[in-house]
Image: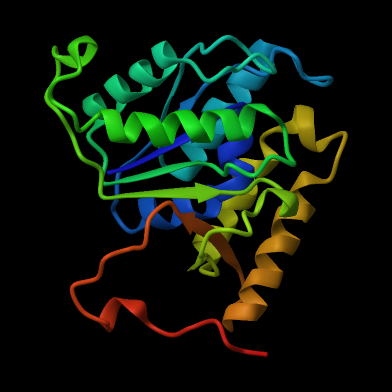
Amino acid sequence: MLLAFGAHPDDIEFGCGGVIARETQAGCGAHLVVCSRGESATSGTPARRTKEAKTGARLLGASIEFIDLGGDAHLEVRVAHVLRLASLIRGVRPDIVLAPSLAENQHPDHPKLGRMVRDAARLARYGGVKELRNSAPHAIGTLLFYAVTPEAEPADLGRVLVDVSAPAVMSAWTAAMETHVSQVSVRNYVELQLTRARLHGLRGGVAYAIPLFPNEPPVLESLEPLGRAARQF
């Protein structure tokens, strides 16, 4: 099971939607958690953006829910929020968690949510947290960060490139991004993400790739899953 967190209704689709589509089309379950409804956005009402996000999740083959952590542009790192996210992780019991990167030069909600998801993933495995005793502890396998913009790609972490070149994956991802009409009608977000994916793909010798940034070094049982390195230039 894959669990992805977004601060706003379009973050997951723009930042890692191709990864979600790739995994669901391979038979992996995916659940999206959106932590605001875009209340502070210049374009689009909360109702409209919620509807767009629900359509985007369906196109990616994922389920979706919305939670309130204070509202768009009002997220703050709080223990109560971290515990709520930890409870959610225990309920979904994912193997892999995706969250916005911790880079500061982006919408301030993104790194704040990334920090809280990171802390929640740790607390979710502790059996003695009194606020979480109504659910069984759960240790995720891997926490990976995604970036919504080039500036949000962390320079202090390694990265993995996920090949999203398959036509069905690209079709689902593009459609999921385009469903956010309230946003793409004012800025060309889709072209930005496709161009980023093309550049990362060129580096890796594939048509399109999305970078993810591991919170900790991945542990492999053998070298076989590594495949090949991105050394095309």
Along the viewing direction, whichever of 38 and 48 lies nearer the viewer: 38
Along the viewing direction, whichever of 135 and 195 lies nearer the viewer: 135
Which residue is pictured at 78% across the width and 54% down the height? 191
Query: Looking at the image, which residue sits at the far right?
Result: 186
Quarter of the view holding residue 76: top right
Relative vertical location of residue 145 with respect to residue 53 in this rendering, above or below: below
**Residue 11 in view here:** yes
Where residue 1 appears, as percent x and y from the top left, is 27, 44
Relative vertical location of residue 124 with respect to residue 134 in this rendering, above or below: below
Where residue 81 appears, as percent x and y from the top left, is 43, 15
Quarter of the view holding residue 198: bottom right
Along the viewing direction, whichever of 178 and 149 lies nearer the viewer: 149
In this picture, residue 139 sits left or right of residue 39: left
In this picture, residue 140 sits left or right of residue 230: left
In this picture, residue 181 sits left or right of residue 96: right
Which residue is pictured at 65% across the width and 54% down the height? 153
In this picture, residue 155 sits left or right of residue 143: right
